[in-house]
Amino acid sequence: MKRRTFIKITSASSAGIMAANAFGINLQLDHMEENIENLVIGSGYGGAVAALRLTQAGKKVVMLEMGLDWEKEDGKYKPFSNLITPKNNSTWLKKSSQAPMMNIAMFNKKFTGVLDRMDFENIKVYAGRGVGGGSLVNGGMAVQPKKAYFQEIFPELSVEKFWATYFPLAQKELEVNEIPDAYYEKSAYYKFARVGESEAHEAGFETVRVPNVYSFEYMKKEEAGEVPKSALAKEVIYGNNHGKQSLEKTYLKKALKTELLTIQDLHRVDYIQQIKNGYAVYVDIIDTEGLVIAKKTINCKKIFLNAGSIGTTKLLLTSMHKGKMTNFDSSLGSHWGNNGNVMTGRNMVNTLFNRVENESTESNYSTGTGSEQSTIPVSGVDNWEDKKHAFFAEISPLPMGMEVYTALYLIINKVPIPGHISYDPALDDIRIHWEKKNYQHTVDNAKYFIKKMNKANGGTPSGLLWKGGYGPDICYHPLGGAVIGKTTDLFGRVKGYENLYVTDGALVPASIGVNPFLTITAIAEYCMEEIIGKDFKK
C-alpha cells in the first residue's frame, strides 16, 4: 500500500472514530457474560412479588431494571421533581417534560429520568423508570376491582380465593391504608375531592372512598409542618420523595434483606434466545444519557418477565424474530388495552355563580376547588353498574398552587374491542394497533359524565386542558399482550417454553375496571405460589 493511501485511510478512520465519539457511539464496547439460576426482568409490581417469594424460598435472584436505582449512592440522582418545576431527572431520555399537560420544562441534555412516555399511533403510554417501576410515579390508588367484573375477565380463576387470600395479601404487603374521615373532612388539601363528591351526588352519581399506599399518617404530619412535604408539595408523577410506600420500601426492601437478591440497574434487555438447559438474555448496559456503554449476555435457567404490559410483550415478540423463538401461542400480542383510560375535566367549577353545597354542613363551600391540593387521590365516582355507561372516574387533583376553578377526572372503562401489538422488523420495535373503534366508547362515556355533571352543577367542558375537552390518547394503565390462560397457562407459565414466566400486567386482558396495580400484585402472588410450589421441585 502506498504511504499516501495509508495516510488517507488512517485519517479517515481517525475522523470516523472522532465523529463516533462526538456522537456518543462507542465502537469497542465491552462484552460480559454471566451465568445464573433465576432472572427477573423488571422491578415493578409483578417483578417485586417474584423477587420476594423466590428469595424467601432460598433462591438466588438477579433482577434487571432499565431505569436507575434511585436509592443508590445515597440517592445521588434525587430529589425527585415536583409537577410545576420538573428537572431533567423527571423525564426519560427527552429534552422536555412529557406530562399529560402543562409541559413547559426544557432540559439541556437527556437523562434516564423517572417518567417515560412511549408514543404510538393514537395512543401515548406512560411508564415508571427505575427500581420500583410504576410504583414510583402513580397516584397510589389501591383499588380492588368489582367482584363480578373480575370473574368476567378471569372466568377460569377462583374469585373467592382471590378475595379471601391474594387481595388481602397484596394489601398487607403494599401497606395499603385509608384516609381517616376526620382528616379528609377538615383538610384544605382535599377540598377538591369534597367538592367533587358533592357535585357527583347532586348529579345522581355514587361515590366511593379509595385506599392508597401513601401514608396518611405521614400526610397529616406534612400538613402540621412536622415532616418534609411530598404529596402536599406537588410531588407525584415525577416521584415522591417522602410518604409513599412504593415498592423499594415494601416488597423489594424485604427481598434485599434476604441477601439473595441482586439488582442491576440501567440494564436494558434486547431479546431472549433458548439455549441448552435454559436461556441466553442479551442486554445493553446504558449510561444516564441512554448511550450503550457495554453489552452483556446472561445465561439462566428460569426467567420471570415483568417489564410491564408493553415491555414484556415487546420482549417476547422481539425474541420471536431475533431469537428464533417461534413456539409461542398465537395469542401473543393480543387482548391489549388501555384499561379504558380517558382524561377529562370541567372548568368554572364552584364559582360565585354555581356554588356547591357542603353536604356535611348544608352550607356552601367557599368558591373554587382549592389553591392547595394533595397530589394523592382518594375519591372516585362509581358508575360501574350502569349497563349503558359503565365507568369508574377518579376525582383527580390539579395542584397548580393557585385557584383554577377546575375539576379533573381519570375515567376508566371496559374495553370490549381490544387492540393488539405486533413487531415491525424494519423498525426493530413494536406497533400498537389501536383505532377509534377501540376507544370511542370511552369518549362517549366521558361526554355523558361531563354533560350530566355540568347540567346539575354548572361548569363547562375542559377545552383548555385537551383538544375537544377529552384525552382518549392518554394511557396510564397498559394491560394485556401475554394474557393468562392464552399466551400463558393459568399460572403465568409461557406456553411452548419451560421455565419462562410472565407475572405482570401483560397477563390482564385489556381492562380491569379500576387502577390495576393491586390486581397485578394479587395475580403475581397467586402465580408465584404455584410456581415455587411445583416448578422448583422438578
Image (tube, rainbow, N blue to C red):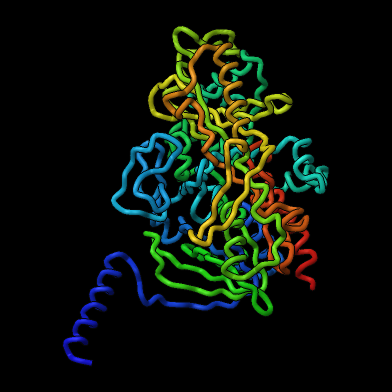
Locate the C terminus by quadrant.
Answer: bottom right
Q: Examine the rendered structure and indicate whether residue 357 appears above or below residue 493.
A: above
Q: Nearer the viewer, residue 297 or 526?
A: 297
Q: Residue at x 45, y 24 (%)?
A: 463
Q: Residue at x 57, y 71 (%)?
A: 281
Asked if one can make out residue 306 in the rendered structure from this viewpoint, the answer is: yes
In which quadrant of the rendered view does residue 30 lie?
A: bottom left
Asked if one can make out residue 173 in the rendered structure from this viewpoint, the answer is: no
Image spot of residue 178 (x, y percent): 63, 34
Q: How many marks?
A: 0
Q: Residue at x 63, y 32 (%)?
A: 210
Q: Examine the rendered structure and indicate whether residue 361 appears above or below residue 172.
A: above
Image spot of residue 56 (x, y percent): 69, 63
Q: Examine the rendered structure and indicate whether residue 25 appears above or below residue 446.
A: below
Locate the N terminus by quadrant.
Answer: bottom left
Q: Nearer the viewer, residue 233 or 454?
A: 454
Q: Is residue 244 left or right of residue 13?
A: right
Q: Residue furthest bottom?
A: 1
Q: Residue furthest left?
A: 4
Image spot of residue 141 (x, y percent): 60, 38
Q: Residue at x 64, y 77 (%)?
A: 275
Image spot of residue 442 (x, y percent): 60, 31
